[in-house]
Amino acid sequence: MSLTPQAGIMEIALYESGKSSIAGRDDVLKLSSNENPLGPPPAAIAAITSAASETHRYPSTDHAELRDAIAEVYGLEASRIICGVGSDEVLQFVTQAFSGEGDEIIYTEHGFSMYPILAHMAGATPVVLPEVERVVDVDIILEAVNEKTKVVFIANPANPTGTLVSDAELKRLADGLPAHVILVLDGAYAEFSEGYDGGKTLAATRPNVLMTRTFSKVYGLGGLRIGWGYGPQEMIDVMTRIRQPFNLSGVQLAAAEAAVRDPDWVRDCAKLNAEQRTRLTGAMRQLGLACDDSEANFVLVRCADKAEADSAEAAFLAEGIIVRRPISYGFPEGLRITVGNAEQTGRVIDALTRWRETN
Ligand SMILES: *Cc1c(COP(=O)(O)O)cnc(C)c1O
């Protein structure tokens, strides 16, 4: 090719999303993308419908109404909130604004696959560090940080492991990082972890901590692409300069505002998830499959080896169930199963029980 892309771009491996269909089946149960089994909140559907008649208008550029709603519900300062096309875009703002060629961006061995993509997009170098027993380790990160490090990404709870770093350990990490390093606490699954504040306390009080949150998971609006970040005013003001003025449509803004103002939704979804997650984890262990306690809306099941996982996946597919194989995350022996509702969880357990009987 005679065209020369920016440095780093050709290093990007294309993102692989969860499969969503099986040829010849119309009863497919998709448990591969950590989507909400209850669908979108009814309040958001109503807001989308009524916003539709205003789509000839350009949307708000400052997202003031959505930011006010988030600030009220989460107890934050609205001026320190930035909204993006999914939290992925907020993660892109921070890497693009604060890193470039010659800089390093740290994440860990089973970390979210967007992190290296975002590092390369910014021209920076992704640095992947080991975890300890599938948990992010603060000491390993602190040892690896140097003057080139610009961003440390931690998803908490993590995807695809579902494990959580404790508040005390996060604080120790924030305390130990030099002032030029931004700690990004990706809270995509924070609502599913009882007692975890999603990184809010650190983001509210530290000059170099950014919390990101999303409407894609517990809020059930993954298809609409809305996320947000919260951090120090100075950091948010920098990121706002590279945000496109009309990055979110009026429909997105209206749906997100309605969802965040629905007080019962998050509580009910998190409760259902916790019940079915306990049930699913227990059943997997009874079938002799290893899995850590998950703090998210999925469970990472570890088979004996890749061949066994291939066999379990084939059994699922034969019963119309799609799960995620986290092979690119370093788990060839793994199956990441989104926690569904009671009926769906029953279908998963039945499928694997039948598979176990013949394998
Ligand atoms: C799903 C997910 C996100 C959210 O992405 P959106 O762009 O907000 O849909 C962020 N981080 C992790 C680790 C995720 O799994």
Image: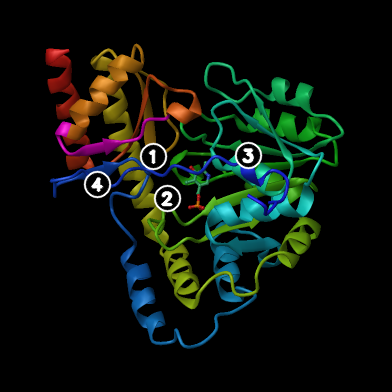
Q: Is 323 contained in the magenta span?
A: yes
The amino acid on which the numbered mark 3 sits, given as a three-letter code, is: Glu
Of the two numbered discs 1 and 4 on the same chain, state the one appearing first in sequence. Answer: 4
Q: What is the CA distance from the residue labelled 1 to the residue labelled 3? A: 31 Å
The label nearer to you, 4 versus 2, is: 4
Q: How crowded is the residue under tag 3: few (<14 C-alpha within 10 Å), some, or many (20+)?
A: few
Q: Which residue is mark 1?
A: 297
The amino acid on which the numbered mark 1 sits, given as a three-letter code, is: Asn
How many numbered markers are drawn? 4
Labelled pair 1, 2 in contact (Cβ < 8 Å): yes
Q: Which residue is mark 2?
A: 217
Q: How crowded is the residue under tag 1: few (<14 C-alpha within 10 Å), some, or many (20+)?
A: many
**Near-viewer residue (16 or 287):** 16
Q: What is the CA distance from the residue labelled 3 to the residue labelled 2? A: 29 Å
Q: Secondary structure at mark 2?
A: loop
> Which percent across, then down, holds residue 355?
16, 20
Is 120 rendered above or below residue 290? below
Q: What is the CA distance from the residue labelled 1 to the residue labelled 4? A: 21 Å
Is 268 rendered above or below residue 144? below
* Magenta-colored span: 318-326
The amino acid on which the numbered mark 4 sits, given as a three-letter code, is: Ser
